[in-house]
Image: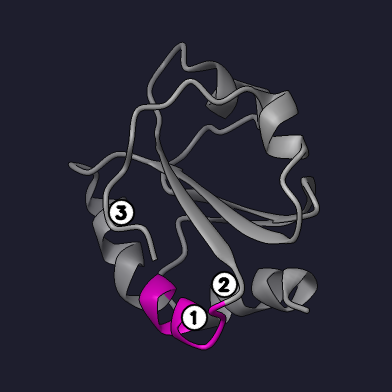
Amino acid sequence: MQTEYVHCDLSRAEVEGWPGPTILEFGAGWCGHCQAAQVPLAEVLAAAAEVKHVKVEDAPGRRLGRSFGVKLWPTFVFLKDGVEVARAVRPTTTGELQPGLAQIAD
């Protein structure tokens, strides 16, 4: 599990080229909703070692977040071989993250 949001210049094309299951998390370290989502996320990822987790620091004007239509933080985008199959916005429980994980886990 990645613990810090990173400012990165990933392109949508790069993300779409990632193989396997990935959770792309958009948010900010100072965001209370993002902080609250970390416990359920850690619980879900503890049983899914094969899932790549990438935390992207988002802000107005950041291209990757805009390309995914991110409006609220945190937004979790569940990708399978670079294709979005599910999403969770502002989850507070593992139950809100489990359906997305089930769709990408092998």
Q: Which residues are magenta?
A: 41-49
User: Can you identify the residue that label 1 sits on?
Assistant: 44
Q: Name the residue furthest top.
A: 61
Q: Name the residue furthest bottom.
A: 47
- Spatial CA span between label 2 and label 1: 7 Å
- Spatial CA span between label 3 and label 2: 14 Å
Quarter containing the N terminus = bottom left
User: Can you identify the residue that label 3 sits on?
Assistant: 33
Q: Is residue 73 above or below residue 7?
A: below
In the image, 2 versus 59, the foreground residue is 2
Q: Name the residue furthest left.
A: 30
- The mark that comes first in sequence, 2 or 1, is 1
Which residue is depicted at the point 27% across and 49% down? 4
Which residue is depicted at the point 63% across and 58% down? 22
Location of residue 9 in the rendering, given as x and y in whole percent from the top left corner: 48, 20
Pointers 2 and 1 in contact (C-beta within 8 Å):
yes
Type of amino acid at the residue the image marks with label 2:
Leu
Location of residue 101 in the rendering, given as x and y in whole percent from the top left corner: 66, 73
Quarter containing the C terminus = bottom right
Q: Is residue 69 above or below residue 34?
A: above
Which residue is depicted at the point 63% across and 22% down? 11
Disc 2: CA contacts within 10 A as few (<14), some (14-19) or many (>=20): many
- The mark that comes first in sequence, 3 or 1, is 3
Q: Which mark is residue 97?
A: 2
Horizontal side, residue 10 vs residue 35: left or right: right
Disc 3: CA contacts within 10 A as few (<14), some (14-19) or many (>=20): some
Location of residue 36 in the rendering, given as x and y in whole percent from the top left corner: 27, 64
Q: The residue tagged with tag 1: helix, strand or loop? A: helix
Q: The residue tagged with tag 3: helix, strand or loop? A: helix
Q: The residue tagged with tag 2: helix, strand or loop? A: helix
Disc 1: CA contacts within 10 A as few (<14), some (14-19) or many (>=20): some
